[in-house]
Amino acid sequence: MKEPVLVCWSGGKDSSLALREIMASGRYEVVALLTTVTAGYDRISMHGVRCALLDQQAAALGLPLRKVAISPGATNAEYEAAMHAALLDYKSQGITTVVFGDLFLEEIRKYRDRMLGEIGLKAIYPVWGLDTAQLARDFIQAGFQAILVCVDPKQLDPKFSGRLFDASLLAEFPPKVDPCGENGEFHTFVFAGPIFKHPLKIEKGEVVTRNSFCFCDLLPAAEV
């Protein structure tokens, strides 16, 4: 019998890689994707991607989606309270495991383990400790397609916002930038790949600077 799990889903590259590993293992049943969204903006928190595209992503994956809403500029306490409420709902259904796509930041892992431990849940990290340069290449070679939707200009030139995550992009990254953006250099949105039933049809909108980050707005193609 497969173990039921939730997947903490950002819509980006690392979430997709973690989901692929979970699905390929044959040991787990993904009950739902769990995504934090910003109320009022109707976008994925931190990444800035429209919830309309998040919905399309979940549909293309064939998985249920639960959005956890937080306010703009939410405190960590608000975030934890919202997540705990959602997670306790699933715990009441017998689900006690949450999947994360973290790669190597020990403090983040300790934080997640503590947050889940407070309500009697546990985490698993399918891509933890893997070489990020190799993982980035594997992502591309596997047929995944993604766009950089958020760039931290303090760590990476804003010109990279809106770029496809491909081999030429990796070759242009400065040596100090982690190829998977694990230090917050950038965030991605995945619109195609081996775990999707079909690719999403998207168009790139304007690039804007907001809260010291550079965001490339993505639009469902039908709205362009």
Image (spheres, helix red, strand yellow):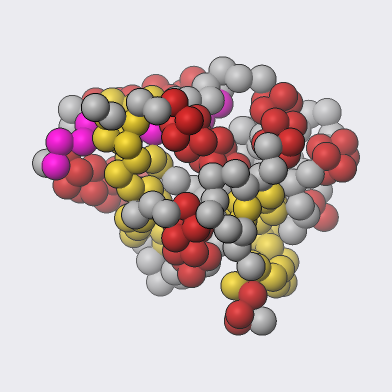
Looking at the rendering, the stretch of residues picked out in magenta corresponds to 93-103
State the residue in front, 157 or 43.
43
Name the residue located 60 percent from the left edge and 44 percent from the top edge. 194
Which image quadrant for residue 223? bottom right
Give the side of residue 171 with respect to residue 111, left or right.
right
Name the residue located 30 percent from the left edge and 44 percent from the top edge. 31
- Position of residue 195 measured from the top left corner of the image (x, y, whole percent): 54, 45
Q: Measured along the vertical axis of the image, is residue 208 above or below residue 114?
A: below
Mark count: 0
State the predominant SS element of the stretch in magenta: loop
Q: Is residue 224 visible?
A: yes
Q: Measured along the vertical axis of the image, is residue 43 above or below residue 122?
A: below
In what quadrant of the picture does the C terminus appear? bottom right
- Position of residue 63 measured from the top left corner of the image (x, y, whole percent): 38, 52
- Position of residue 157 measured from the top left corner of the image (x, y, whole percent): 81, 48
Which image quadrant for residue 177? top right
In what quadrant of the picture does the N terminus appear? top left
Name the residue located 35 percent from the left edge and 26 percent from the top edge. 27
**Magenta run includes residue 101:** yes
Q: Is residue 77 visible?
A: no
State the residue in front, 145 or 107.
145
- Position of residue 97 measured from the top left corner of the image (x, y, whole percent): 28, 30
Name the residue located 67 percent from the left edge and 50 percent from the top edge. 146
Give the side of residue 55 with respect to residue 34, left or right.
right
Give the side of residue 35 with respect to residue 134, left or right.
left
